[in-house]
Each structure stands twice: as structure tokens, then as C-alpha cells.
Image (cartoon, rainbow, N blue to C red):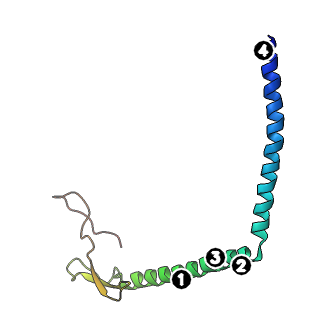
Amino acid sequence: MKGKILFLAGTATGYVLGSRAGRQAYDQIKGKAQNLWGDPNVQKVVSQAGQAAKDAATVAQSKISGAAKDAKKDTPSSSTSSPTDTPVVSTTSTEDGFQEEIPVVPPTTFGAPGTTGTTPPV
């Protein structure tokens, strides 16, 4: 029984002393981190990174918007297309400046083979 009490007393003493030392180390690390974050050079880099992210988002939005408009423009309307029309070709530009033609062939019917399908909705 005496051994258990001494063990618990030693554990409690170690915990108290360790937590005090641990708290001091934590406070030192926290203070250094706050000083680093408050450094004008660090804030300048953070601001530049934020602006670069905003600029990249604007560029991406304009590219996506332009691609969507081109795709909508290249899509045939339901009144002018029929299954016997020649396939529509969509032309896109690649990043290296080449033109790429992609055939756009809509399905003519829906349904299982051997059945009379319906014309797809457009």
C-alpha cells in the first residue's frame, strides 16, 4: 500500500512540474509565432499571396465564362438540327496555340436496340 501511495505522489509531482515546464515552453512558442505573424515582411507576403489568389480566380472565371459562351454558341439549336444533318464540329484552341476540332454527334434515338426509340429532347 505504501508503494502505491508513493507512486501516486511521484506521478502527481511529475505532472505538476511537467505541466509548469510545458506551459512555459508553450508560452515561448506562442510568443515567437505571434511575433513572426506580426512581422511587416510576413504580412507583406501574406497580402501578396492573397492578391495573387484573387487574380488567379478572376482569370479562371473569365476563361470558364468564355468557354461556356463558346460551347453554347457551338451547340446547334433544336429547330435547325435533324438526324440527317452533317455532324457539327466544335473548334477549340489549346494552350500551345493549336486549333483542335472535336466532332459533336448527338444520338439520334433513345431506347433498346430493335425498338422504336424517341427523338432525344434538346
Tell us which disc is closer to us: 4 or 3: 4
Q: Are marks 4 and 3 in contact (CB under 8 Å)?
A: no
Mark 4: secondary structure:
helix
Image height of 63 relative to 4, above or below? below
Frontmost of labels 2 and 4 is 4
* Residue pictured at 63% horizontal, 76% vertical: 49
Q: Is residue 104 left or right of residue 69?
A: left
> How far is disc 3 from disc 2 in space, using C-alphas?
9 Å
Percent x, y of residue 18: 79, 38
Amino acid at the residue labelled 4? Gly
Q: Is residue 59 left or right of residue 105?
A: right
Please state which of residues 31 and 65 is positioned toward the viewer in this rendering.
31
Q: Earlier in the sequence, mark 4 or mark 3?
A: 4
Q: Circle 4 sits on which residue?
A: 3
> As displayed, is residue 86 above or below residue 111?
below
Say whether marks 2 and 4 touch (CB < 8 Å).
no
Identify the element where label 2 is drawn.
helix
Residue at the extreme top = 1
Q: Is residue 117 above or below residue 96?
A: above
- Does the residue at mark 3 contact the one at mark 1 (Cβ under 8 Å)? no
Residue at (82% x, 49% y) in the render: 24
The span from disc 3 to disc 1 (Cα, nearest Å) is: 15 Å
Q: Is residue 58 left or right of residue 118?
A: right
**In the image, residue 75 lies at what x, y percent?**
36, 81
For the residues marked 1 and 2, what is the alpha-carbon distance in whole angstroms? 23 Å
| Residue identified by numbered label 2 | 44
Marks 3, 1: nearer the viewer: 3
Q: Nearer the viewer, residue 105 or 62?
A: 62
Residue furthest out toward the left: 114
Tag 2 or tag 1, which sits nearer the N-term?
A: 2
On residue 59, which mark appears? 1
The one nearer the camera, 44 or 107, is: 44
